[in-house]
Amino acid sequence: MKRNSRLSLALHTLGHMASDPNRVRTSSDIAEHAGTNPVVVRRVLGKLREAGLLTSEKGHAGGWRLARQPQDITLADVYLALDERMVATGETSEAPACSVEHALHKRVSTVLEDIEASLVKRLSETSISEVR
Amino acid sequence: MKRNSRLSLALHTLGHMASDPNRVRTSSDIAEHAGTNPVVVRRVLGKLREAGLLTSEKGHAGGWRLARQPQDITLADVYLALDERMVATGETSEAPACSVEHALHKRVSTVLEDIEASLVKRLSETSISEVR
DNA sequence: ACAAATGCAACTGCAAAAGTTACGAGCAAC
DNA sequence: GTTGCTCGTAACTTTTGCAGTTGCATTTGT
């Protein structure tokens, strides 16, 4: 698959679900449509379930369903649910040690956090019911 | 090393160079300070040279030097020189095939391009002489 | 009971990036 | 002009993250 594959898969799947919210879909169906694998689908959609965007049911007639109305799920909800920030400050967790590095990190982090926030804001302006 | 390592290495190095522009530095010196390897340093700084931010000289007293005044080199110059966009649309190059995927990609790409542009704009407001 | 589905853990395979080694070419000092 | 230090570059190895895969327990409807 390509880069940003989890986000692509998640958005793509929810886009389809938005156009027919009552239909229950299995991981296999979704995987086949997306050209991937049921386990990968469950991993990604599992994150969305944790975030309250989807529900899943085990057993014979089980599968995945939207947990809310399509117009109440935004692209930002999906993006945040996967918590893989595109604009990330690297999150060093290493002591800067060097003063130049410290100043740099501070300055760059500020910019990146602003950018990240505006990305989320932009994504929150579109719901998954608007992307078909 | 950590993630975004090339950009970190580049900015860190240029930050130091900005505070003493006349000093010539070797790849080994830089690598030692940054906790990495001379070849990696040359690979990264080579990109900056191609972009006209640095000059290098071979031979006995050779090494790296800023090609311009520190206040004329912005964080955006460095970011763009490495052409590794943080906010990337995935650049699928695959035919979308599915209409939902197509609509999604179009919408998301627009947002990401805007965000990328505003990131560059923000980075261009700070020069490497301001980060120490 | 059985079939169909998720949940989850463990493993493999692959690709991108860092790291490493090696060697050629240029330049200064002696 | 020989020597020593530097960049430039290619080739290889190592590391790492993620998709993909397999296997099995659990749940649920028929």
Image: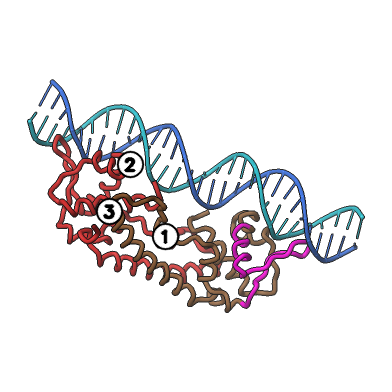
Chain colours: A red, B brown, C blue, D cyan
Same-chain status of marks 1 and 2: no
For the point 23% across and 58% down, the residue is A128
Provide the secondary structure element on which disc 1 rests. loop
Q: Which mark is residue A44?
A: none
The amino acid type found where label 1 is placed reads Ala
For the point 59% across and 69% down, the residue is B14
Q: Which mark is residue B88?
A: 1
Magenta residues, start to end? B43-69
**Residues under labels 1 and 3: Cα distance?**
21 Å
Is residue B123 or residue B84 the one in the foreground? B84
Residue at numbered disc 3:
B99
For the point 67% across and 60% down, the residue is B27
The subunit letter for the residue under badge 2 reads A
**Residues under labels 2 and 3: Cα distance?**
18 Å
**Residues under labels 1 and 2: Cα distance?**
22 Å
Residue at numbered disc 2:
A36
The amino acid type found where label 2 is placed reads Thr
Residue A131 place in picture, x, y as percent: 25, 59
Residue B118 appears in view: yes
Query: For the residue carrying disc 3, how many other residues have a C-alpha within 10 Å: few (<14), some (14-19), or many (20+)?
Result: some
Whether the residues at callouts 1 and 2 have beta carbons within 8 Å, the answer is: no
Is residue D18 or residue B80 the one in the foreground? B80
Residue A113 appears in view: no
